Image (cartoon, grey):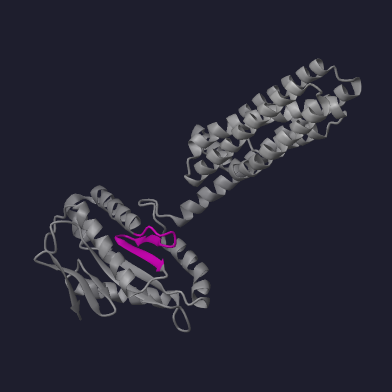
Amino acid sequence: MTKKMKKQSKKNIEQINIYRAIKSSFLLSLCIPIIMLIYGITVWDNALLKIIFIFGLLIFEIIQVTYCVVLYIQVKNNEFDSYFVLYMSYYTITIIMLMLASGFDMKAFSSEIIYMAACAYFVFVPVILERERLIMVTIISVIMISMVVIFKMNVRTVVDVCVIQIGTVFLSRYQHNVSFTKERMSSTLKKKTDVSEHDPLTGLYNRRALEQKANAIWPYCERNKVSVGILAIDIDFFKKYNDAFGHPKGDECLKMVAEVLKNSAQRKTDIVTRTGGEEFIIFVQNTDEQNIVQLALKIRRNLEAKAIPHAYKLVSNNVTISIGAATFVPGYGKSFEKLYEEADKALYAAKNNGRNCIVYNGNLYGRIKNGIAQVITM
């Protein structure tokens, strides 16, 4: 595996931690202090020590809850890079507290239940990488050895601790390998899927992905009477652009137009596609005449703002587009292919009426005269 792939795998594994980590964090922020409090109240007779102990637990509880809140905020804001650093520091503190609680449990109640629960948490709750796993195994081992010496535990307890600790080492290694292999296979599959569904030049979806996604959501739209629409888009006189500037510049132009389309159609349900050459399709849901025309005009304005020079100045000094729009509510006789066909016919009407405009339902939008957008009924 290359360094780049390893880095991506690490990032993906870090994100796998998120939801399990936060859920377990909230539970542990409650459980550990309660366990420690029970120990302090039942075992220690000195009132001053109890007060100090309870005060320490309160501080720990505040730290735990604060960590949980900050982690949750980072997840909501997609701040995954700083999340991992914070999570690992929190995780280390939690493991240490679990080990201390385990030592108290063994000393006071001759029980290894908390220790086994702590080891299970270490193995199954987070998914950490090999370096971090070895560090945590070392910390756990040092703490437990220290507990055995400080509390002068009996031989049976020492043997149990050793057996559990050895099992934890091997199980954590196995869990690490399973998780990492699963994530790597998932990343490979996703990469292959992305290659098959995306246009290599612009990064937009290709025709295959468009048809798959449209066919997947079509039954839902038909069942719930959700209106759908298509913008069929063509770069005006793109062949002349290539002839004048060359194909490398033409590729750069396609990328800039694709960027405009992607930045203009930003709803999660919007599907922006390059279907071939200088042709693009945007598939939208829950739209109507006003919304789809507004989106088309927005795209046109955003492209004008780019001011990409064009050698063929019959329409404009800069690169322009023609757009055909169509909408309807899916139903009998109203398939995706039919919608595509209507948008394509509107696109040809836009081309035949001077280009650099939008056609929807027989109306022509966006013709510029004296700097003012015109609306012309055809």
Looking at the rendered structure, the number of numbered marks drawn on it comes to: 0
Q: Which quadrant would the C terminus be assigned to in this image? A: bottom left
Quarter of the image for the N terminus: give it: top right
Magenta highlight on residue 269: yes
Instruction: Name the one closer to the observer, 96 or 212.
Output: 96
- Taking the spot 64% from the left edge, 38% from the top edge, the residue there is 127
- The answer to whether one can see residue 163 in this image is no
Q: Is residue 352 left or right of residue 214?
A: left
Looking at the image, which is closer to me, 135 or 209? Answer: 135
Q: Position of residue 288 (x, y in %)?
A: 36, 74
Residue at 27%, 62% (x, y): give it.
298
Task: Locate residue 332, reporting x and y percent.
Answer: 48, 84
Displayed quadrant of residue 362: bottom left
User: x, y percentage for residue 207?
Assistant: 42, 63
Which portion, as a residue range, is magenta? 265-284
Q: Residue 173 appears in which quarter of the rendering? A: top right
Whether residue 22 is visible to the viewer of this picture, yes or no, is yes
Residue under the point 52% across and 37% down: 83
Position of 285 with respect to 108 (left or right) is left
Q: In the rendered view, tell whether residue 253 sits above or below residue 94.
A: below
Q: Position of residue 92 (x, y in %)?
A: 64, 28
Q: Is residue 218 above or below residue 181?
A: below
177 in the magenta segment = no
